[in-house]
Amino acid sequence: MSIESETAMPWETDVHTAEARWQAEWEESRLFEVQAWDTTAPTYYCLVMFPYPSGRIHMGHVRNYVIGDVFASYHRMKGETVLHPIGWDAFGLPAENAAIKHGIHPERWTRDNIASMRTQLKRLGISYDWSREFATCDDAYYRWNQWFFLRMMERGLVERRKAPVNWCPKCCTVLANEQVQNGCWRCSSEVHQKELEQWFIRITAYADRLLDGHEALRAGWPAEVLAMQRNWIGRSEGAEINFTLRDGSGSLRVFTTRADTLYGATFMAMAPEHPWAVARAQRSADVAAYLRRAARKTAQDRSADREKTGVDTGMRAINPLTGAEIPIYVADYILPGYGTGAVMCVPAHDQRDFEFARTHGLPVVEVIRPDAGSSTLPDAAFESEGVMVNSGTFDGLTSAECRRLIVEELERRGTGKRTVNYRLKDWLVSRQRYWGTPIPVIYCDTCGVVPVRDEDLPVKLPSGVELTGKGDSPLAHVPEFVHTVCHRCGGPAHRETDTMDTFVDSSWYYARYTDPRNGNEPFSPAAARRWLPVSQYVGGIEHACMHLIYARFWHKVMKDVGLVDTEEPFLRLLTQGMVTLGGSAMSKSKGNIVEPDTIISRYGADTTRLFILFAAPPEKQLDWNDAGVEGCWRFINRVDRLADAVLTRPAKEAAPAQAHALLCVYHRCVRGVTRDVADEFQFNTAIAKLMELANTLQAYPAVGDEASRAVMRGLVLMLSLFTPHLCEELWRRLGGTGSVRVQPWPMPDPAYLTDTEVEVPVQINGKLRSRVTVPADAGEDTLKAAVLADERIKAHVNNRTVVRWVIVPGKMVNVVVREG
């Protein structure tokens, strides 16, 4: 298919026909497919975060996808071989909920939504390589989820153990956290915590490597994301301390980062899930009753700022330094995931312990003061560093010194040791749901837990499954799935009926895109070497501590099994801001969605793309504004008319100085737009520069001459990043051949970059009040005269005395004035 546009309709009357025409041309010519490896050209891998096929996309999604397309388009025009794929994170709870609500199979719901969203994305003209598309519910994909699970089992990274889950006693089912909404989302029953056997991936074994990897990411990732991950992983250097029980029956081990406060430990507390608490409940009715009450609370409820509850177990421990007996409580503000699930409590120096001690009448012993002369017991806990008191031979030392010395003393006594703890916990991947990857394990009465053989993968999801939302995993009620034969002994066995967390699907999809049709391995190491790590990743900051940590972990495992050579999956990361409407994030539940189809149907895809990129810097929140959309529509049509003027007006002969001035503006624009796109990621300012260039060209007295035609071609090339359909049309009108989207990116000519004039910001007492344009080589006297002649500056200087001038040549002027 070949498109010629010598006689084109005006864009404003032909927008939908033209955009559809160019989209068909790109698809038929397979313009964006990576057909073969061009080993002479550098590669660039641009990726947006995995879309979930919810059915419809809104402007928040569009922003993500269009930002990615700008990166891909720019690097393609720079002559790089660009991989820009798309696919679908297709497993998940929403599909199962839809099946329950509407009586439609999750796969049909998912496939229908994929078809709808694929159409929407194609209408936006994004340069995806659709030949690499896949969905994670394809067994050709989730087979490799299972393969990775088996490799992790071989390395001791997978284990099965008990863990608390959200349990609805009426529906007799496990609930995901998002299904707990003032009780069970289906029946509103009170949700309890219940322990079940669950599968875990030992991500904690990679905690230090995840932290160490931040150094390599510092140049390309937002500092905020790295800080969030450091906090999520939560590496804490501290000590494990053993408190011997008074009756000599054992010792209770705790972790603390503040060994310096040990002399102030006046009680201990353990989580309701702690094995000692569970054992004590068998002998104490009070403890048993408390554990039942705690089981009705979520982790969020327990960690909330409220009255601290607990129950005395009757057990007593010995403080290893003071020798004092201290009571042991069960308290639900202690969570099982931190340290050992038990803590030493120092109410004078921990606010939660202070509140608990005040509620339960427990002693508060101050062991750290801000300085030697400070008052004694506070009205609240003092949690900072200071000087030691009431700490025996350690009195008078700083708390930092004491922290080290007390650990050394504990090590000498054999009652403690230095250790490192992590807030990061092992990844619970079991889900008692249908629509996910089956866990490739069978259970045999003779052989025990038996991994499925590689040659028997994939373990496929059966299709005839009744989904009710009640009871255990739906797979448990499919006899032909459950009952199998043990390949080790030939005896009867049954399959695992849990499925995997859907974060598994999105933890390595980027690597599958490099070799998506490989049936022999997840992807070839050669393909990985060619494309990985991802050059530019685009997605929301809300994924900083889940998806991005899981993907980084998975990549390191893939390196360990020999599939990749690099430690990190994503070289650079851009986290785009939310799109809001009326100040609130767009959400179906809030009813404040702006769907792209509505805007495209009125203004076309290019206007939609241009506004979403022009309205705000990509990392900032963007508030949807209909007037801004209208303004972008007018600009696009103005460029269309400007191209016609360049082509149809009789050429006038411009003065050499006029043509030179136009070309200077153009080449400075090329330099600025290149910097904004490639280095600063400031697409809004790049578009503003193109708007200024269009204004300059429109005012040029010899529109139609050779200089104006050259500038128009350059304007079209740069604008094609943002409005590709219009620019395809204009490129052909201007005599260009081939697609505008694969033309070489314009290069600024140094001969036109010598600035004869500069614009200097002018401040009055540190506040920007105006800008003046002066010769680039202007001295201070000339600059001062221009400032004082400026009308806006006059208004601020009149009747005031100039005290001092602060001049940074060519950069800034600050005039310091005072009254009178």
Image (tube, helix red, strand yellow):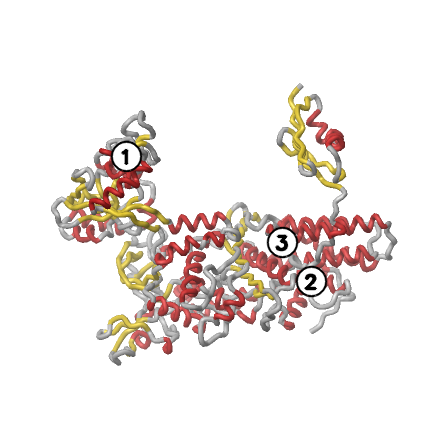
Q: In this image, 213 relative to 617: left or right?
A: left
**Residue under label 2:** 744
Q: Position of residue 578 (x, y in %)?
A: 52, 50
Hey, which residue is sitting farthest top in the picture? 820
- Quadrant location, the N terminus: bottom right
Q: In this image, 706 relative to 541: left or right?
A: right
User: Is residue 752 positioned above or below 170 on the image?
Assistant: above
Residue visible at 31% across and 56% down in the picture: 166
Residue visible at 35% across and 50% down in the picture: 423
Residue 677 has which mark?
A: 3
Residue 364 shows in this picture: no
Given residues 713 and 606, the one toward you in this image is 713
Q: Position of residue 81 (x, y in %)?
A: 60, 66
Q: Quick one: label 1 or label 3, which is nearer the N terminus?
A: 1
Q: Quick one: label 2 or label 1, which is nearer the N terminus?
A: 1
Residue 348 has which mark?
A: 1
The quadrant where residue 530 appears: bottom right
Q: Give the Cα separation between the discs numbered 2 and 1.
A: 68 Å
Q: Position of residue 699 (x, y in %)?
A: 79, 48
